[in-house]
Structures are given as C-alpha cells and as structure tokens.
Image (cartoon, rainbow, N blue to C red):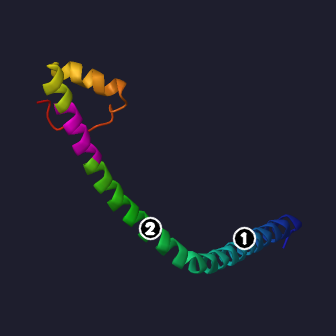
Amino acid sequence: MSLCEYRQLVGARDRVKNGLTKLLETNILIDNMKVELVALEPELKQKSEDTEVLMEKLAVDQEQADAVCQHVFHFIYRQHHLSCDECLIVMYWFGLFHCQLSTCI
C-alpha cells in the first residue's frame, strides 16, 4: 500500500468516525428532548385545554358584542334617520368599527 493510498484510507476512516460521533451526539440530544417533552406533556395538554375554553368563550363574547353592535346600529338608524353609510361612520367614531354587521337595515 502506498503512502497516498494510506492517507486516503485514514482520511476516509476519520470522516466515518466524525460522522458516527455526530450521529451519537444527535441521538443524545434527541433522547434529552424526548425526556423534556414527556415532562412538558401535562403542561402542554392543560394549556391546550385552557386555550380551547378561551376560544369558546371568545366566540360567545363575539356573538354578544355583535348583537350589541347590531342594536346600536339600528337605534342610530331609526332615531336619527341616517343612511346606512352615515350610521357606519357614527359607529366608527364611537369605536364600534369592529362590529360584524350582518345587514345594514
């Protein structure tokens, strides 16, 4: 075996050794992350449930807020004989521009 072939063989061996070392390090990191994930699982589950409850409450609150906006809109429309666009402008200035109005009249 020539010196050149020997150096190529040693280089290839070192690359394989480095690759195996990196794989081992990666496996250790993955094992650590698995342990952390198992430890966090109850907390994540609780936060997920809390988020679901909050989203349901938010949907109910949004429906109630939309109903109030609808009543305000119709009150302004009937009491002040304004057009639909004028009512929307009034509501905008009173901070009710986020309302989900299903109909103008």
Extent of the magenta region: 65-74
List the residue tagged with mark 2.
50
Residue in the image at 18% along x and 20% along y: 80
Pair 1/2: label in front: 2
List the residue tagged with mark 1.
22
For the residue pair 30 and 35, the one nearer the viewer reads as 35
Image position of 42 (left or right of 26): left
Above or below, 23 against 62 in this view is below
Total numbered labels: 2
Amino acid carrying mark 2 in the image: Asp
Image position of 21 (left or right of 50): right
Residue 1 image offset from top left, x and y in percent: 84, 73
Binning the other alpha carbons within 10 Å of mark 2 as few (below 14), some (14 to 19) or many (20 upward) gives: few
Residue 11 image offset from top left, x and y in percent: 80, 66
Residue in the image at 25% along x and 50% along y: 63
Residue 44 image offset from top left, x and y in percent: 51, 71
Magenta stretch containing residue 64, yes or no? no
Above or below, 91 against 39 in this view is above
